[in-house]
Image (cartoon, helix red, strand yellow):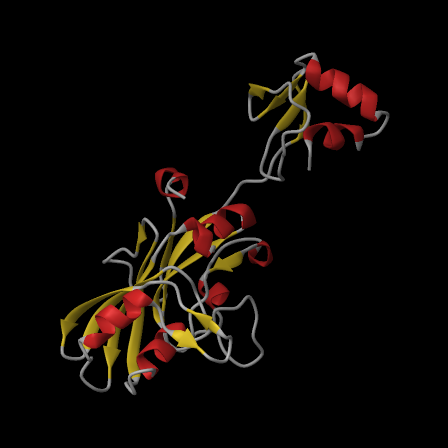
Amino acid sequence: MRLDRFIASLPDRSHRQARLLVASGRVEVNGQMVRDGTCDIRVFDHVALDGQTLQAGKPARFFMLHKPAGCVSATSDPQHPTVLDLLDEPDKDELHIAGRLDFNTTGLLIITNDGLWSRRLTQPESLLGKTYHVETEGPIDPACVERFAEGLYFRFENLTTRPAQLELLGPRQARLTLHEGRYHQVKRMFGHFNNKVTRLHRERMGPLILDDDLQPGRYRSLTSAETAMI
């Protein structure tokens, strides 16, 4: 919400009064004087007028979780355990998952209550790659490297995937970096070459790398430095 509209929504404040209060330098957002009433404020921001708190601000929360197999990337599920079940945190209903993983896919998940931040992390326009370790049933055709870089046509959606980077690690292992998240995309890309993905593990999302010592099912809070990278 715009700052002036937020102030005008309070009791006994008109839109004209709100604009004058902001323009006169009497309003602070997160400890900084703001004179532009059109600036956006969020539930996480502390807003004060003449030193008196108008909105205390809700703390933004960010967690890195090592998702195990057999766990649903959802906030609730009637049949299977969810990734939120793994968190021992208050007010879990306020959290959401930034970039889901399939039921048997393992690896890095980010969970937060900040929707704007999570969109920056996951939107293709941000150009933040998601890197996966892939194991396949059959040998990986070296031609996949060039074809993935060119983009593959998905007939069902009538679209071509964005260029992806494939690094061969062995006959049946590779590291793949995507810049989007289509439905079962990794499995379908290898399916173009009649090769089944037998194990899929996400190692990285943009600059955020899964800790080597973070065991499956465990999680930790992101540092302020890590959240600032997005």
Q: Residue at x 75, y 21 (%)?
A: 19
Residue occupying image coordinates x 31% and y 79%: 190
Asked whether the viewer can see residue 216, the reply is no
Quadrant assignment, res 131? bottom left
Q: Position of residue 80 (x, y in %)?
A: 50, 78
Query: In terms of image quadrants, where is residue 93?
Result: bottom right
* Image height of 99 relative to 224, above or below: below
Which x, y percent locates residue 64? 38, 55
Residue 61 visible at all: yes
Query: Residue at image x 82%, y 26%?
Result: 15
The residue positioned farthest toward the left in the image shown:
170
Percent across and percent down for residue 229 are 37, 41
Residue 176 drawn above or below residue 34:
below
- Left/right placement of residue 3 relative to residue 175 reads right
Number of numbered discs overlaid on the protein picture: 0
Quadrant location of the N terminus? top right
Side of 5 relative to 63 (left or right): right
Q: Residue at x 82, y 21 (%)?
A: 16
Which quadrant is the C terminus positioned in? top left
Q: Position of residue 172 (x, y in %)?
A: 18, 79
Q: Is residue 24 left or right of residue 156?
A: right
